[in-house]
Amino acid sequence: SWDVIENRIDPDYAVGMGAGIYLRSILDKKTDLINVTPSPIGIELDDGSMKVLLEASRQIPCSASDYFAPVRPGEKMILNVYEGFNKIAKDNQCIGQLVLEPEDQSNFSMNVRVDKSGTLHVKMIEEATNRVRQIPIIREYSQDEADIKHLSENAVIDDTLLKDTSSKDKL
C-alpha cells in the first residue's frame, strides 16, 4: 500500500542504479547520445546584464559570433564570460575572463565555440589590427565519448534489485 514508506532503499543508490540501467540500455541499442549546452553562455555588458551568445540546449558542437565596441575607446577592457540562466551576469557562474587593450576606437568580433568534448573556446579579434585574444574554458561537467563508454562499461547492476519485485511495490 502507498501509506507505508519503504526506507530500506537508499534513494541516491536507486537513482544511480536507474541512470546506469538507462545508459546501458541506450548504449546496447547503439543509440547516439546527443550532448547539449546545459545552460546559456554569455558575457557581462557594461550595465551588468548578461548578453547570451549560446542558448541552453544547443547541440554540441556549436558556435556563435557577435560584434562589440568598447564603452571607453582606448581603455583596457575586462570581458567576463558567464554561464547561467539569470539576466544579471554576476548571478551566474563566471567561467572565464579575457583582458583586451584596444587601440583607439577599434571594434571587436567575438566567436564563442563549444567543441565536441565540451570545451568552450572564446576568441576576440580586434578589427583595426586583427590582433587575436582567446581562451579555452574546460567546464567540469564535460564528458567525451571515452568517459561515457568507461562509465557504462563499469556500471555494476545489482541483480537482487531487479529480481526483487516486492520492494518495487512498496515504493
Image: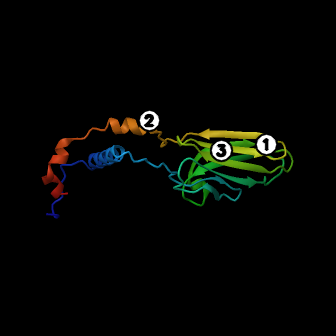
- Kind of element beneath mark 1: loop
Between discs 2 and 1, the one toward the N terminus? 1
Residue at 68% x, 48% y: name it. 111
Q: Which residue is identified by label 1?
A: 101
Residue at 47% x, 40% y: name it. 143
Instruction: Measuring from the top left, give residue 163's x and y in whole percent.
Output: 15, 47
Instruction: Measuring from the top left, give residue 70's x and y in whole percent.
Output: 78, 52
Instruction: Measuring from the top left, give residue 75's x and y in whole percent.
Output: 81, 47
Q: Mark 3, residues whose alpha carbon is within 10 Å: few (<14), some, or many (≥20)?
A: many
Q: Amino acid at mark 1?
A: Glu
In-image side of 88 versus 125 (left or right): left
Q: Which residue is identified by label 2?
A: 146
Label 3 vs label 1, nearer the camera: 3
- Kind of element beneath mark 2: helix
- Distance between the alpha carbons at the discs numbered 3 and 1: 16 Å
Could you say which is closer to the camera, residue 63 or residue 171? 63
Could you say which is closer to the camera, residue 164 or residue 76? 164
- Choose top left, top right, bottom left or bottom right for residue 88: bottom right
> The C terminus is located in which quarter?
bottom left
- Distance between the alpha carbons at the discs numbered 2 and 1: 40 Å
Q: Which residue is identified by label 3?
A: 122
Instruction: Measuring from the top left, give residue 125's x and y in whole percent.
Output: 76, 44
Q: Residue furthest right?
A: 104
- Distance between the alpha carbons at the discs numbered 3 and 2: 25 Å
